Image (cartoon, rainbow, N blue to C red):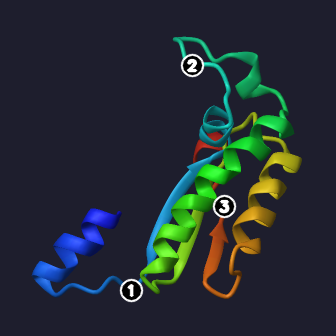
Amino acid sequence: MEKFFNIKCRYSGLIPDVVVLVATVRALKMHGGGPRLPQALDPAYVTENLELMEKGLCNLEVHIENALKFGIPTVVAANSFKDDTEAEVEMVREAATGWRAAMVRLILPKLWSSL
């Protein structure tokens, strides 16, 4: 993202209207120290694990902070899988809207949860 803003935007004169960060509960668990993904999903990714989520949310926070440094409104799109629990989704919602809430919005598409 920094290269896009610092190089591409400066050179081309583009000014983005919004930054969209796409996250999943699964990815946040992985960034929180969850096991590497083999062919089959580890139970850590298909059962509720709020501790992994808490650790992984700092990764999302860094991306949000990086986007906000450029003064661009930020949207967090948290794709939901069928195994994501309401508590995990709520944790993403609270975290995303808690960081400088005036600039960050959360959307929860349900595409993957229906497959």
Q: Position of residue 41 (x, y in %)?
A: 63, 18
Q: Residue flagged by tag 3: what amino acid is it?
A: Leu
Q: Which x, y percent locates residue 62?
A: 56, 60
Element class at badge 2: loop
**Nearer mark to the viewer, of 1 and 2:** 2
Q: Earlier in the sequence, mark 2 or mark 3?
A: 2
Judge from the rendering whether residue 5 lies leftward or rightward of residue 17; answer left or right: left
The answer to which image quadrant residue 27 occupies is top right
Q: Residue furthest left?
A: 11
Residue at disc 3, secondary structure = loop
Q: Quadrant of the N terminus?
A: bottom left
Residue at 61 percent of width and 37 percent of height: 31
**Amino acid type of the residue tagged 1 in the rendering:** Asp
* Residue that appears at 75% across and 23% down: 44
For label 1, the crowd category at 10 Å Cα-Cα, with few meaning under 14, some 14 to 19 and many 20 or more, is few
**Residue on which disc 1 sits:** 17
Residue picked out by circle 3:
108
The percent position of residue 36, horizontal first and vertical second, equals 57, 19
Considering only order in the chain, which callout, 2 or 1, is on the residue closer to the N terminus?
A: 1
Secondary structure found at label 1: loop
In the picture shown, does residue 52 fall above or below 22? above
User: Residue 45: percent from the left, percent from the top?
Assistant: 71, 27
Q: Which residue is mark 2?
A: 36
**Distance of mark 1 from mark 2, alpha carbons?**
35 Å
Q: Residue at x 67, y 29 (%)?
A: 33
Q: CA distance from mark 2 to mark 3?
A: 25 Å
Kindly indicate the quadrant of the structure image that contains residue 114: top right
